[in-house]
Amino acid sequence: MSKKDNAPMPASSAGLLTFFNEETQGVKIRPEVVLIGSVVLIAVSIVINIFA
């Protein structure tokens, strides 16, 4: 291992954020799907509010 591999990550936002390149387990959803789902949910809520 080189010294560069053990170097600490630079602090961002007073050290509150840390970004990792490692893949973690869990559900993988594309951002477009989340955005479209949110818009559909808002639209359904508005329609229900109008007719109910």
Image (tube, rainbow, N blue to C red):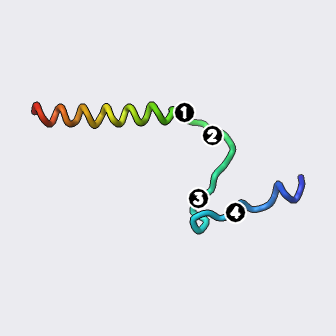
* In the image, residue 45 above or below residue 9: above
Q: Cα distance, mark 4 to mark 2?
A: 21 Å
Give SS at disc 4.
Answer: loop
Provide residue 16's location: percent of width, then percent of height. Answer: 57, 63
Label 3: state its secondary structure.
loop
Picture quadrant where residue 14 is located: bottom right
Looking at the rendered structure, the kind of residue marked 2 is Thr
Identify the residue position indicated by label 3 in the image.
Answer: 17
- Residue ID for mark 1: 28
x and y, in percent, of residue 43 in the image: 25, 33
> Residue, x 18% and y 32% (percent of image)?
47
Q: Which quadrant, please, contains the C terminus?
A: top left
Q: Quadrant of residue 45?
A: top left
Which is more toward the observer, 7 or 27?
7
| Inter-mark Cα distance, 3 to 1 | 21 Å
Confirm or deny contact between disc 4 and disc 2 (CB under 8 A).
Answer: no
Q: Amino acid at mark 1?
A: Lys
Query: Which mark, by number, is residue 24?
Result: 2
Q: Amino acid at mark 3?
A: Leu
The spot of residue 25 in percent (x, y) is 60, 37
Q: Earlier in the sequence, mark 3 or mark 4?
A: 4
Label located before the other in sequence (3 or 1):
3
Crowd around label 2: few <14 · some 14–19 · many ≥20 (10 Å): few
Secondary structure under tag 2 reads loop
